[in-house]
Image (cartoon, helix red, strand yellow):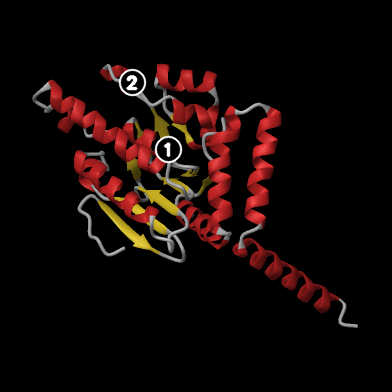
Amino acid sequence: MEKEYKTIAVAEEEGFATITLNRPDEMNAISREMQRELLDCFTRMEDNDSIRAVVITGGDYVFSAGIDLKELSSLPREEDNGEYITAMIKYLQQIYTFKRPVIAAVGGIALGGGFNLVTVCDMIIASETAIFGHPELKFGLNPLFNPLARFVGTAKAKEITMLGEPIGAREALRIGLVNKVMPPEMFLEEAKSMARELARRPTRAIEAVKKLSDIVRRLDKKTALEHEFEITALLYTLKESKEQMSRFLGEMETRKTKKDPS
């Protein structure tokens, strides 16, 4: 991607992009400008076929301390608050509904709006230093409930959002909030390795699995299975799927020949 941003840094790698929140002096607090830049970045990537997965990180020491409270508290009029909330909805929706996998690589704290950003991603890789929390109720604000509940379930999401107690990396793994916990020097590379592997998968199939994961949870068992096999039948007709199958069979045949040269 060629566009330069002020509050985020974007690097395109082997089939995926890494987005780094870049307000270190403000602990990556999410400002209106950062919201606009994330919205623009994900909108551009939606039509970029060379980007088949995305990693979002804040770096080694902090993911994000949350919404920029100084900026929020200084909004002069009620109408400005409405515009602020609308902008927040737009950028989170764009990431939440992004058609390709998005992985959050979390080092250090991810609080409030930073935690919201983490939970609209598909998968979460945490450093052993990661701390998650929703302290919003202490300021009279409400946390995002739905994205969190999709990871940990309704009962646990109520506990996390209502009490606002911090969650360490190991506890986050235990409750199903994160996929993996890694040493501080390895968590970002692990997220990139996962993105690199996802980028090698058939693009349409990955997009279909992501979409299905949203849809089938709301269907009855019979309809869910029927819908999944309808998608399977559709994917089977695609040239990309057949090429992948042929490649796999060829690799298996090569391995068999090496094992039994006679």
| Label 1 SS | loop
**Extreme-bottom residue of the structure:** 262
Q: Residues within 10 Å of mark 2 (few under 14, many from 20)?
A: some
Residue at coordinates 79% horizontally, 73% vertically from top-left? 253
Q: Separation of disc 1 and disc 2 at Cα?
A: 16 Å
Residue 168: image location, x then y, percent: 47, 33
Q: Quadrant of the N terminus?
A: bottom left
- The image shows residue 250 at horizontal and vertical percentages of 73, 73
- What kind of residue is marked 2? Asn
Position of residue 200 in the picture relative to residue 50 (left or right): right
Vertical position of residue 154 compared to residue 247: above or below: above
Q: Residue at x 77, y 76 (%)?
A: 254
Q: Nearer the viewer, residue 229 or 112?
A: 229
* Residue 123 position in % (x across, y down): 50, 43
Residue 120: numbered disc: 1
Horizontal side of 73 relative to 216 (left or right) equals: left
Q: Is residue 173 visible?
A: no
Is residue 201 found left or right of 82 in the rendered image? right
Q: Earlier in the sequence, mark 1 or mark 2?
A: 1
| Label ID, residue 142 | 2
Residue 71 image point, x, y percent: 16, 33
Report helix, strand or loop for mark 2.
loop
Residue at 21 percent across and 41 percent down: it is 26
**Considering only vertical position in the picture, is 36 above or below 89?**
below
